[in-house]
Image (tube, rainbow, N blue to C red):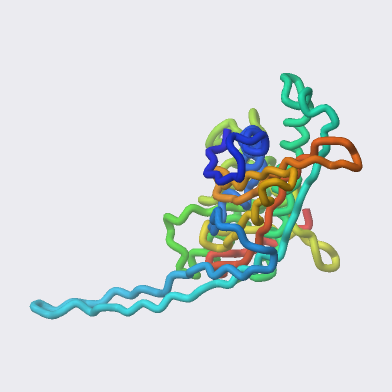
Amino acid sequence: MAELTSTNNAVWIPAEIIANQTLGALGAYLNLGRTVTKDSDITTVQQGTVISVPKRGAVTSNSLAEGGSVNIQSITGTDVQVTLNKHQEVTISELDYTRSLQPGSVLPGYMEDAVIALAEDIESALAGLWASAAFNNDAASGGVAATIMQDFIGMQKGLFDRKVPVLAKRYAYVSTGLHAVAQAATAFIDPKLIPNNNVLTEGAVGRISGFDVFAGQLTVKSGSPGVHRNLFYTRNAMVLATRPQPLPDAGLGAVGSNVIDANGIALQVVKSYNPTKLANQFTVHVVFGAAVLDDRQFGVLDSTV
């Protein structure tokens, strides 16, 4: 279950209970959203607000002569502007509210589906940043098992050449086709070479050339002929900024809860009554924006699978 930080406009409201029950699905579904920099706050804002995310400046080392003085650096950082230009919502009505709170109710399942739908919107926005990466490599032969290891080594080299720290945590968000190719690579099926049995037993590639590999169901396919834009990045490559909307005023027949889940993503859950449907109504929504934070730590591998 997700750990929550929350504010609300009522005492122990159903909206908060439902948020607590369903937000675990968000972290379980996210890949990109879990592994990029987050800028979240419980402070409410409106869609279109511009958030300034600090980006660290460069630091250099200096030689120090015997008896000399240190060189004090006045580091000038910059800000990356992230516009909260996306507002996604899912609203579900429940005619029998009492039944909706009973064991076996389908409402928690539908709310979990709602959170997953919002997670897909977040993943798609981050995957769409591929064009701002520092470099693009073409997968050998479009991506085949015999050369997949060289493709990953090439992406690793691209990041190292751009001074990305060797020990920085690295991730690969790749198409399902390229993930399948990696599963068929000799290194993962030859008993003499296989590092573990995750590929055979779990269908998970795990790590290649220092990259934690995710099968990305929402990788962008673009160009003519179309190629998949597989993302290779560190946590500092991209930033996801989220803020909740203002809570509904008391006395309006709606109660809401602003929550930040364990992954640092701010959502709002609202319970209200729909008089035209004579039903209780639940809405979960998120205002967010995504941007490249440091393009040096971001590369793309183009593949036809």
Q: Quadrant of residue 112?
A: top right
Relative image position of residue 134 (x, y in whole percent): 59, 71
Q: Residue at x 54, y 41 (%)?
A: 4
Nearest the viewer among 8 and 305 is: 8
Instruction: State the quadrant of the N terminus.
Output: top right
Q: Residue at x 40, y 74 (%)?
A: 58
- Image: 58 above or below 145: below
Nearest the viewer among 198 and 131 is: 131
Residue 138 seen in render: no
- Image: 100 above or below 282: above
Relative image position of residue 87 (x, y in whole percent): 73, 58
- Image: 120 above or below 302: above
Q: Residue furthest left?
A: 67
Relative image position of residue 131 (x, y in whole percent): 69, 69
Position of 8 compared to 220: left or right? left
- Image: 13 above or below 39: above
Q: Residue at x 61, y 68 (%)?
A: 82
Q: Quadrant of residue 220?
A: bottom right
Relative image position of residue 190 (x, y in whole percent): 61, 35
Q: Residue furthest right?
A: 276
Q: Residue at x 66, y 59 (%)?
A: 288
Position of 222 compared to 170: left or right? right
Residue 299 seen in render: yes
